[in-house]
Image (cartoon, rainbow, N blue to C red):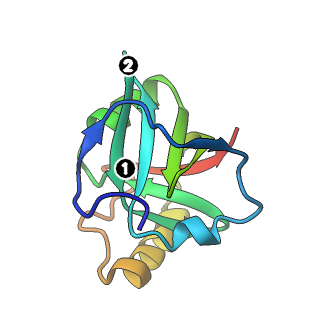
Amino acid sequence: MACGDHLPLSGGALTGEPAAAPMTWMGVATDDIIQLETQGEAPYSVNLWTVLVDDDLHVFAGDNYANWVEHIEGNALVRLQSDNLVYALKAERVTDPGHFEQFAQAWETKYGNRPRNESVQETYLFRLTKR
C-alpha cells in the first residue's frame, strides 16, 4: 500500500524521492491509496483512492468540494506519491459523461462499489497526466 490505512488524512509537502513518470501507471494503480499534494497557500497533501482509466490515473472527491479540489482549481500542478517515489503531474477535471462511466466501472472493479454520486456535473473527478 502506498501510505496509511485510513482516509482522509492531510499533511504538508510530500517527502519522497522525486522520480520521472513511469511509462505505465499499472504499478501505482494497484496501490489501494496514494498521496496527492496540491498547492494552496502552502503544500497540502491528502491520502486518496485512485483508479486507472485509459492509461491515466484518476482521483475522485465525489460531490465533496474538498480543500484539495479547491487547490487544483487554482493551480493544476500536483505531486503524487506512491511508496517513496514522488511524481510531478497535472490534474484536469473530467466533465465528459462517457469518460466518467469508464471511471465508475474501474472504481467498482477495484473497490467493489460504484461512486455514490455519478453526476459528472456535481462531482469532482480529476485525470492526472504528465507535466
Name the residue: 41% across, 68% down: 1
The answer to whether mark 1 and mark 2 are in CB contact below 8 A is: no
Q: Is residue 89 visible?
A: yes
Looking at the rendered image, the disc whose residue lies closer to the viewer, 1 or 2, is: 2
Type of amino acid under label 2: Ala
Left or right, 105 with respect to 48, comes to right
Considering only vertical position in the picture, is 105 above or below 120?
below
Q: Residue at x 53, y 39 (%)?
A: 79
Q: Quadrant of the C terminus?
A: top right
Residue bearing mark 2: 42
Determine the residue positioned at 22% across, 60% down: 6
Residue 94 visible in the current orientation: no
Element class at badge 1: loop
93 relative to 54, above or below: above
Q: Quadrant of residue 7?
A: bottom left
> Which residue matches tag 1?
121
- The residue closer to the viewer here, 16 or 89, is 16
Callout count: 2
Image position of 8 (left or right of 85): left
Q: CA distance from mark 1 to mark 2?
A: 28 Å
Q: Can you give x and y, in whole percent of width and height, for residue 63 in the image?
A: 25, 50
Please say if 2 is above or below 68.
below
Measured from the top left, where is residue 34 in percent x and y?
A: 43, 56
- Element under disc 2: loop
Q: Residue visible at 48% across and 62% down?
A: 97
N-terminal-most mark, 1 or 2: 2
Q: Position of residue 50 (x, y in %)?
A: 44, 62
Q: Is residue 95 left or right of residue 42?
A: right
Single out the residue that lies furthest toward the top: 41
Query: Residue 56: horizontal and vertical position, in percent?
Result: 63, 60
Residue 56, numbered circle? none
Q: Amino acid at mark 1?
A: Gln
